[in-house]
Amino acid sequence: MLQVISLLVENKPGALMRITGVLSARGYNIESLTVARTLDPTLSRMTIVVDVDPALRRQVIKQMNRLVNVLQASDLTEERAVAREMVLLRVRAPLESRTAILKEAEIFSARVVDSSVEGFVLEASGDPEKLDEFIDVMRAYGEIEVTRSGIVAVSLESRRLRLSPPVPTRAEREDAGSRLMDVPSS
Amino acid sequence: MPNLMSGARMLVECLVREGVECIFGYPGGVTLPVYDVFYDHPIRHVLVRHEENAAFAASGYARATGRVGVCCATSGPGSTNLVTGLVDALMDSVPLVALTGQVSTKAIGSDAFQEADTFGITRSCTKHNYLVKNLKDLPAIVHEAFYIASTGRPGPVLIDLPKDILQGQGHYAPVSSIHLPGYKVVTEGHTGQIRRAAQMIWEAERPLVYAGGGIVSSGAHEELRELVELLDAPAVLTLMGLGCLPGDHPNFLSMPGMHGSYAANMSMTHADLLIALGVRFDDRVTGRLSAFAPHAKVIHVDIDPVEIGKNRAADLPIVGDAKRVLRKLLRILHETVAERERKAAARQAWWRQIRAWQKEHPLLPAFSDREIKPQHLMVEIDRLTRGEAIITADVGQHQMWAAQFIRFKRPRHWLCSGGLGAMGFGLPAAMGAQFACPDKLVVAIVGDGGFQMSIPELATIVANRLPVKVVICNNGYLGMVRQWQNLFFNNRLCAVAMEGFPDVEKLGAAYGIPARIVQRPSELATALETALAEPGPYILDVRVSPEENVYPMVPAGAALNEMVLGPPQPVPVPK
Ligand SMILES: Cc1ncc(C[n+]2csc(CCOP(=O)(O)OP(=O)(O)O)c2C)c(N)n1
Ligand SMILES: [Mg+2]
């Protein structure tokens, strides 16, 4: 089974490379990776799907949590979580199959985002396995071209986000120390 | 109104605020603005002869003191030359800040002259790294870098500084606080877990303390000693932990692992409890992991959660700073000390067994009156330095003999490249240690191979009047590689003879460093005494028996109790 990792990361240069570096250092191939801003524009939410040896999954999460720019990395593989994906699918089909395609699209709640004499571009979203089926079905109607977004996932369990508070710089600590020493002892 | 100044000056101001006194570096085109600040600034810049040695010297400085070592290199070749030193510091958890020049921000990515993707190259070589894109971010980045390098599990942090940032003018306002919300450092161990640890300790019949570099980093050697003595437990120290217990402490069983003592490895194999403190179950310590400490439960204390359960599952994990955890643990153990009697009989039997192992195959140096045995050299160094000197080693056989036969009294007196095993470390690290501790005797024990990687730094030693003593354990070979060819490749020696080794007396004369070659065992003691008594630097080329192998040895892939105790016929130890 693939591992689904959800990360909350600081939107800093190099952060993505460090995170994927944890995986690439072990030679793991990433199946999908999505990243986008959160409500707080300085932070990004990332979902990674990757084939990690089950014995090493905890290790990988710990290594990601160790990164300075990672606020939280969690493993959604075995917890209650919702995973969704979107697909944009272009299907080239003869005019006589158009109605059938539209019927089929309706079954999968796909929307038509472009229509031309050559065919359609359809947009579907949902459970990744459902999308696999959708793609399979559409293949029957003609030549298709598929762009998948990769999975975005959210945990259904509430997890406390623990952030480190600011700390004084060394010089500041020393100044404070010497100020304390200046105070005459009673 | 805050001061208007260049990025380079701002950088140096921030270094001063971090208490930096000394920087090891090598200049170049894009770092010129920084050197222009150094020109009339009290901060000390030490010009080395190769950037790799700047990193190693900074590492020696950091390892000897616990303070952050700083090195500096120019863009492109300067920064790529630092890479080995960065990885070495990462592997051995050494606090380092590396400053590298970079081409101007507008030129980045254009294959400009002396451009290298330092930020990308060093991503996996550092604990964290930065590329400064805006001058206003510079002060915060510098303070973050020092904070990250020196807290939690220490490590190297690199700051890549484009030329336009260094040259640009900006208003400098000192930064007073560091905000790194995602940088989590757990120092206090979980009290409940520590209580359980105490319980496990009292229940153990065959406990063994297994401590390493984490004790050095957290300065927990006194607590470690108290623990060992309170429990009267046997203890082993890894290569990185030597000195955390005095080398002649009766409970100390020497180093475990590939070239560990028989008693240490047998104790590991038979213990029912490992109290693992600031160690990472490295393959050089565990031998074949599946056969490592098969009867032991493991209490694992480490500040880095990634280490816990990485190689060996911990029955009781404790994430925290070793010193704080040990203090709490000691308090609980003192409160419950009556429990010590419960397993007293079993523990006495455990000690009898260990003493029998020690007697059966003691770690004894070899002597000869025809040639100088390398072990003999280490025993003499031990006798003359009495655990008081800072000793650095390079990598190879001499490093293992030094670890086996020199008894260190205190931490931060034995500096070597453990995790990376980087040849060329010993001599520059000794320079760094000597800068940090000008009044200490600093001895670099190097192989004839490693020495030749460091010869250019003799000039740095001369230029800075560093009284470093260089002792070459000269076997005429890349000895450790020869040993493996000898043992595992039918002695088909290939590319290991160090032909063309220079006449060190002439080499010394060329640099103006007194130097001597010793060949006879009878001359060794006085030659060493003279070398160590020299007020300035000295090079002693000790010709040791060329074909000596390091024993005991756990061959790669073997279990600790399958060690080979010595020549000529390797005999596996019965289980
Ligand atoms: C930079 C580097 N290159 C290669 C090695 C592999 N290596 C490990 S020990 C060794 C031999 C070291 O020879 P020498 O310095 O003479 O020390 P000796 O083993 O003879 O004491 C070599 C080549 C290494 N550790 N580091
Ligand atoms: Mg040699």
Image (cartoon, coloured by chain):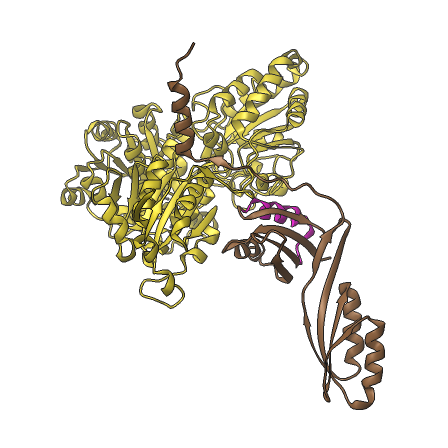
Q: Residue A26 falls in which quadrant of the image?
A: bottom right
- Residue B291 image position (x, y, % from top left): 63, 40
Residue in front for this viewpoint, B71 or B134? B134
- Residue A126 image position (x, y, % from top left): 77, 64
Give the overall secondary structure of the magenta segment: helix
**For residue B174: magenta?**
no
Q: In the rendered image of this protein, which colour is used for chain A?
A: brown
Left or right of residue B129, residue B111 in this image = left
Residue in front for this viewpoint, B54 or A67? A67
Looking at the image, residue B479 lies above or below residue A46: above
In the picture as drawn, the residue positioned furthest to the top comes out as A186
Q: Which residues are magenta?
A: A50-67
- Residue B361 image position (x, y, % from top left): 49, 28
Left or right of residue B181, residue B530 in this image = left
**For residue A53: magenta?**
yes
Looking at the image, residue B387 lies above or below residue A104: above
Q: Residue B38 falls in which quadrant of the image?
A: top left
Q: Name the residue: 18% across, 38% down.
A: B515
Q: Name the residue: 28% across, 27% down.
A: B440
Left or right of residue B47, residue B347 in this image = right
The N terminus of chain A sits in image quarter: bottom right
The C terminus of chain A sits in image quarter: top left
Q: Which chain is yellow?
A: B
Q: Name the residue: 28% across, 49% down.
A: B34
Residue in front for this viewpoint, B202 or B344? B202
Left or right of residue B54, residue B459 in this image = left
Q: Name the residue: 77% across, 74% down.
A: A111
- Residue B163 image position (x, y, % from top left): 32, 57
Q: Is residue B410 visible?
A: yes
